Each structure stands twice: as C-alpha cells, then as structure tokens.
Image (spheres, helix red, strand yellow):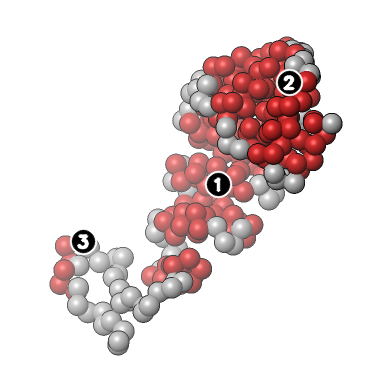
Amino acid sequence: MDLAEASRLLAAGRTDEALVQCQRAILAAPSDLRAYHLLATILHQQGKIAEAAEAMRRAVALAPASVPLRVNLAAMLGQLGKLEDALAELRQAIHYGGDLPELHNNLGVTLEKLDRLTEAAAAYRRAISLRRDYPEAHCNLGNTLRKAGKIDRAAAAYRLALSLRPTYAKAYDGLASAAVEMGDANEAIACFRRMIELDPQSPGARSALLYTLHYCADQDAQSLFAEHREWDVRFGGAGRAREEPVHCGDRNVPAHGLAADRNVCPTKAE
C-alpha cells in the first residue's frame, strides 16, 4: 500500500510525501526491487543525484542483469561526473543486454566525455552498424570526428543524420560548425537559417547566424543591418526606454580610416 501511494504522490508532483511513503515501503520490505527503483526516481526528481544513484545501486544489486536499471545508474553517475563508473555500468549493460544500438550509443557518449575519441567513434560506428537509420548516433559520430580534427568526415556524418531526420537541429548545428572550420560560410549560414526555421525563438541560432554573416562576401551593409534589427526586435528591444543611437560604420573602410569618419552618422533626435 505504501508503494502504491508513493507512486500516486509522485505522479501528482508531491515528492516529499512520496519519499516518506517509499521509505516506509522499504522498511516493510527491504528487498523490494520496485521500492528502491521508485526511491531513486523520487530522489532524482528532487535533485538529490548522489542519493538517487545510491538507491539505484541497491536496485541493481537486487537485479544485476537488468539493463534498464544499469543504464539509469550510468546516467546518474554521469551527472555526478563519475564517468569511469558510468562506463563500467554501461559495459555491464552490454554484457547482459547484448548488442543493442542504444547501449553502444550511450557508451560512445561517455567515452567522448572522457576524451577517448577513438573509442567513442568506434562505439558510435557499432551502434550505426546495428541500426543504419540512427540519426543520433550519426550526429554523435560527427561531433567526435570534429573534435578529432577530421572535419570532412564529421560533415559527412552530420549530413547522414540530416538525411534520416531533416528537422534535426543538433545535426544542423554540428554541420554549421564543421562548415565554419572548412571556411564555407555559405553552408554554415544555410544551416543556421534552417535552425531558425525550426525554432524561430532561438537566440543562439540567430546570434550564430549574425556572427557568420560577417564572413560572407555576398552580404552588404543593408542586409546585415536588417538581420541585426530582426534579432533586436525578437530579443533585445523589450523594456527599452528609448532607442539607442544608430551607428553607421562601413565594414569596407580600412581600420586606419575609421577615426576620421566617426561623426558622419547622425543619431536619431531625442
């Protein structure tokens, strides 16, 4: 009864009360796997990650062959920065669960965080070999290859991810970064524009677009100004008491000539 009540309270968002009921259930049945699993879930929702991981360890001890429990424990250990411990849990999950693509992808994520890029890439490739249409694994492989300086291959991995999921914002972001490193501002701009189409209220994508536009020879001062005004309308104008003076610097004026023209552009009347 205590465990059922704890689950009901958790679903209602009453985590403190759920915790009390769950602890009662554990006192009544110290070997109840479901109780430790629920305890870990409650503690995790409360932000008590270390305590949640300990509760999940108890659950794993009661069911060592449970792949979902080991994956959950690995995720909590990762949040605590205990990456080697997380890696060990994931390897055990693969041992018990077999060649599941999700497990190899998670293994790759942990290896990447440990900066073991060659092993991470191998894990992502294993995930892809088990499931060709796995956009997350392709994107993660792209991230690892880019970190390793293999930019062309990273871009190819991002494009594969996008061919599988054309609305995958993270893959567009990765491809944009690869394009910038390859000196292809036009492709980077196209990626950022697509990200903005997918999420018009993303300040990060719009800021990245504005920055990259300065390196595109096709952009003139008027179009750049329009893009900056669009950013300001969406993110910078709320609550402004008055408009700031308009600055009309010419991007094509050599640096040594800027000072002579500093007063040419009038400000708006107050």
- Identify the image quadrant of residue 75: top right
- Identify the image quadrant of residue 97: top right
Residue 214: horizontal and vertical position, in percent?
39, 59
Residue 77: horizontal and vertical position, in percent?
58, 24
Q: Which of 259 and 120 is in front in this view?
A: 120
Which badge, 2 or 3, is on the more N-terminal residue?
2
**Circle 1 is placed at which residue position?**
173
Which badge, 3 or 1, is on the more N-terminal residue?
1
- Please state which of the two labelled residues, at mark 1 or mark 2, is closer to the viewer: 2
Which badge, 1 or 2, is on the more N-terminal residue?
2
Secondary structure category for the residue under label 3: helix
How many marks overall? 3
- Name which residue lies at 48% across and 65% down: 235
Q: How far apart are marks 1 and 2 (CA)?
A: 49 Å
The answer to whether residue 185 shows anywhere in this view is yes
In the displayed image of the protein, which residue is found farthest to the bottom?
269
Residue type of the residue flagged with mark 2: Leu
Whether residue 262 is situated above or below residue 142 in the rendered picture: below
**Circle 3 is placed at which residue position?**
255
Q: Which of 81 and 104 is in front in this view?
A: 81
Q: Nearer the viewer, residue 208 or 60?
A: 60
Whether residue 90 is situated above or below residue 15 in the rendered picture: above
**Circle 2 is placed at which residue position?**
27
Whether residue 52 is situated above or below residue 204 in the rendered picture: above
Secondary structure category for the residue under label 1: helix
Residue type of the residue flagged with mark 3: Ala
Q: Nearer the viewer, residue 265 or 86?
A: 86
Residue type of the residue flagged with mark 1: Asp
Counting other residues with Cα less than 10 Å from the Cα at mark 1, is it few (<14), some (14-19), or many (20 or more)? many
Question: Dividing the image into 4 quarters, which one contains the N terminus?
Answer: top right
Q: Which mark is residue 150?
A: none
